[in-house]
Image (cartoon, rainbow, N blue to C red):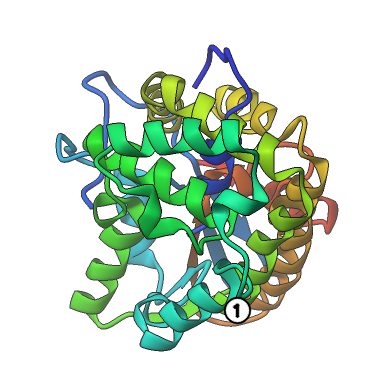
Amino acid sequence: MIKFKKQIITIGIIFSLCLSAIASSKEIQRSCLWRVTSGTNSVFLLGSIHVLKDNSTALNPSIEKAFNDSRVLVFELDPKDMSDAKAQQMLLAKGLLPEGQSLDKVISKETYNLAKSRASQLGLDIATFNRFKPWLFVMRLAMAKMQRLGFSNQKGIDTYFYSKAAQSGKMVIGLETFAQQMDMLDIMSTMNQDDLVRQAIKDLDVMEEELGSIIEAWTNGDIKALEQVIFKSFKDFPLIYKALIINRNIAWAAKITKLLEKDDNHMVIVGAAHLAGKDGVVELLKKKGFDVEQL
C-alpha cells in the first residue's frame, strides 16, 4: 500500500485485528517476519494479512522455515475462542444497540439513507442491521465489500497457519481474549457516529486499490510502505489508534518478553500493523534490549 488517497479507517482496523498464502512472481528478498533471540530460544514475529484471495501461491521460504522451527504458535486470539458460540454471543452483546435504539436513530437521516444505498449495492438489507451499533455495521459493510472483491479471512495468513498447526500437532495459544477485542472495538461508540459511518462508506470506493497496495508491500517485506498506508488510516482517529494499536502492542511486548524466557521457539502471528512503526512490537522489543532481525 503505497499511494494513499483517503483516510481508510476500516482498512486500518481490519489489519490491526483478527488461506492460502501469497507471493509475487519475482524473487523475494525480505518478508514481514522478524526473529527475536534470547539466551534460551527464538521468537519469530510474523505480520499477518487477515484476508486474502484465492489466487495465492507460496510464502517466502523464511516464513515456512520459522513455522517448522517453532514448537508453539501464538495468535492474537486462540482461534478456538473465536469459533466458540460464546464469542458470537459476546459480539452481539457488545455490538448491539440498547433496547429502544436503532441505527436510523443514532445517525442522521441523510447518512442512514446513504448507508442504506451502499448496503443495497453490496446485496445487504440495512433493516437486518438496524440494531447494530455503527462500528459493527461499518465493519460488516467492509467485510461484504472485501468478499465482493474475492477476499476472505478463511484464506488469510492466520487461518493458513492455524490449519498447519493443527495438522502438525503444534501447540496454539492466544495473546488476548475475544472479550478484550470487543471492548477495544466498542471504543468507536464514543466517536461521532455520523462521521464514522460516512468515512467508512467513502473507504469502500478505494478499498480494492488499497488492499492491493498492502498485499504488495507485505509480500515484498516493505515495512515502510505498510506504515504509509496503515498508519495514515488512523491519523484522524487517535483514540482508536491508542486502543487498537499502542495499548495492545505494549501488552503483547510484555507477553513476548516472557516467551523469550522459555526453552521452546515460538512463532507469533499478529496483524502487520502491530509490528510496524515507532510504536510497533518490533521497536518495543528492541528498546528492551533484544536482538531483533528482519528475515
Residue 229 appearing in the image: yes
The residue indicated by pointer 1 is: 179
Q: Residues within 10 Å of mark 1 (few under 14, many from 20)?
A: some
Q: Residue at x 15, y 34 (%)?
A: 55
Residue 210 image point, x, y percent: 45, 23
What's the residue type where badge 1 is placed?
Answer: Ala
Q: In the image, is 34 to the left or to the right of 239?
A: left
Above or below, 93 relative to 44: below
Q: Position of residue 186 (x, y in %)?
A: 67, 63
The quarter of the picture where residue 59 lies is top left
User: How far across and down, in percent of the image, does residue 3 sit?
Assistant: 54, 11
Dot 1 falls on a residue whose secondary structure is helix
Q: Is residue 150 above or below residue 91?
A: above
Residue at screen point 44% across, 33% down: 218
Q: How many marks?
A: 1
Looking at the image, can residue 35 be seen?
no
Up-down: is 231 above or below 155? Answer: above
| Residue 123 place in picture, x, y as percent | 24, 41
Horizontal relation, residue 42 to residue 196: left or right:
left
- Image quadrant assignment for residue 49: top left
- 101 and 33: which is toward the camera: 101
Q: Which of the two residues, 29 or 194, is positioned nearer the viewer here?
A: 194
Residue lying at 21% horizontally and 37% vertically, measured from the top left: 150
Give the vertical position of 223 relative to 273 (above or below): above
What residue is rendered at 80% in x and 51% in y? 242
